[in-house]
Amino acid sequence: MVLAGLLVFVAAVGGAAGLAMVKSQVSQIPRVSVGLSLDLGERGDSEAQNFLLVGVDNAAGIDPDSPIHIDRDVNTLLTDSVILVRIDPDADRVAMLSIPRDLWVPIAGRGWSERVNAARRIGGAGTLIETVSEYLGVPIHHYVEINFAGFLRIVDAVGGVPVEIAQPIRDDSLGLRIEETGVVTLDPETALAYVRTRRPLTVREGGNPAIDEDWVRLGVWNDLERNQRQQDFMVATLKRAVENGIRNPFALRRVANELLDDDNPSITLDDRITVGQLVDLGDEFRSFRVDQIERYKLPVVDATIDGKQVLLLVEREAEPVLEFFQAESLAGVRVRVLNGTLSGTVAGVEDALELAGFSVVGRGNADRFDIARTVVRHTEATEAEAERLARYVEPAPLLELVADIDGADVELVVGADYAGISGSPRDSAS
């Protein structure tokens, strides 16, 4: 999963120059034919794209004595982790959304439901893509898959990954045991067990790690905790890579050689993405910082269906999160900001809109300065853009239809009630 992250978060690590130097290595990565399952609409290089990053529960190519093989068939095809990554060059934003593997979903084209981690086994990568896209209503433009061997190699390539360990953690089923606390640099196999555990134990207060009875349940033992660890670990790995100089083209080339020149490929890309597209992304994100990556999670509840412990999506609460991954780039919404109060200024409003991802194309004063409630003006042709903007304005503004708006899609008339621009949309505009 993290190797996939290195490719997708291209700007956060190597950048355009680095990827240009490793074109030959990246071009050798195996492809999976899923083009017909992807959103194939015409897109510019700077438009927002969604990548589906999939970690496969497959231990092929790993030392047979490794604890990874405990209770595992070498040919397992379940997905161990699924992360949706949105890259929006226009808005200079990268965000990731973890999809719990136990999420109960209708399997695309099958007429019945199952946990999402079974979709790939049932019908291949294309079925997984279509299942996630159809159920969550999000377009998926590219697909990246990695197995356990790839994960181990990337952690080894960056020299281990420092992780903040708040409490001792143990999971005998995965060979995981970390007794020290604070910042601990995890070796490859410990790191893999750390991001995979769903039933970790910790030492009770005042207990002795050497006594088995003093190890007690840590957390609530659900996939959401594991999703959080996976997101944290991905960001920590990317930071480690940058600290180790991977932005240097020669360092990136060395790591690429270690990871990609292998008789047992551990990473797979979709059949539509090109090396040139990756290089273009690197150019768009050449100054992007890893700590700017935004993290989201799906609201879910526990349930039992057909005797299986599953997670059900809380659809109403999920709408604001999914809308961000569903929508086209906010940078396509051109906003003129107008001050409608005697004491107000639009300078801070403009900055907040641009931070959220909108394009501000002008600012000035409204035709009056006694506006009590903030207004979003739009034409018949830009009603959808107005509704999108309105969901970010606090509190919810009025929508006003006007005959024409010259040089912009919508106008935001700032009233006395204006309280700011939210980082994520509400589930409705009013």
Image (cartoon, rainbow, N blue to C red):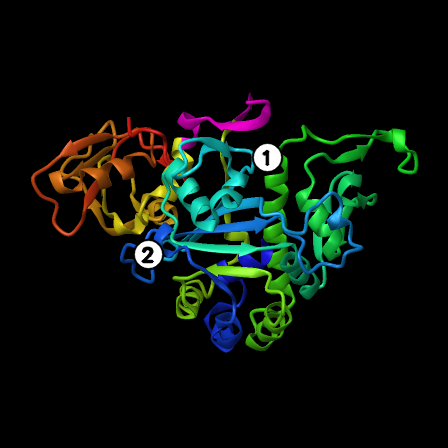
SS assignment for the magenta stretch, majority = strand
Report, in whole angstroms, how far the alpha carbon at label 1 lies from the one at label 2.
30 Å
At which x and y percent is residue 390? 28, 35
Residue 288 visible = no
Asked whether 307 falls inside the magenta stretch, the response is: yes
Judge from the rendering whether residue 152 lies leftward or rightward of residue 273; answer left or right: right
Q: Residues within 10 Å of mark 2 (few under 14, many from 20)?
A: some
Membership of 60 in magenta stretch: no
Residue 267 position, x and y percent, is: 56, 60
**Image mark for residue 224:** 1
Expressed as whole percent of the image width and height from the top left, the position of residue 235 reads 59, 52
Mark 1 is surrounded, within 10 Å at the Cα level, by few (under 14), some (14 to 19) or many (20 or more) other residues, namely many
Q: Which residue matches tag 2? A: 47
Secondary structure of the residue carrying tag 1 is: helix
Residue sitting at x 55%, y 22%: 306
Give amino acid for label 2. Answer: Glu
Q: Amino acid at mark 1?
A: Leu
Nearest-to-viewer mark from 1 and 2: 1
Q: Which residues are magenta?
A: 301-318
| Residue 91: % across, % down | 37, 53
Question: Which element is circle 2 on?
Answer: loop
- Is residue 230 placed above or below 33 in the rendered structure? above
Residue 369 quadrant? top left
Res. 398 visible in picture: yes
Question: Is 20 located above or below residue 87 in the figure?
Answer: below
Q: Quadrant of the C terminus?
A: top left
Decide if residue 274 is on the left or right side of residue 193.
left
Q: Is 381 or 353 nearer to us in this picture?
A: 381
Sequence-wise, the earlier of marks 1 and 2 is: 2
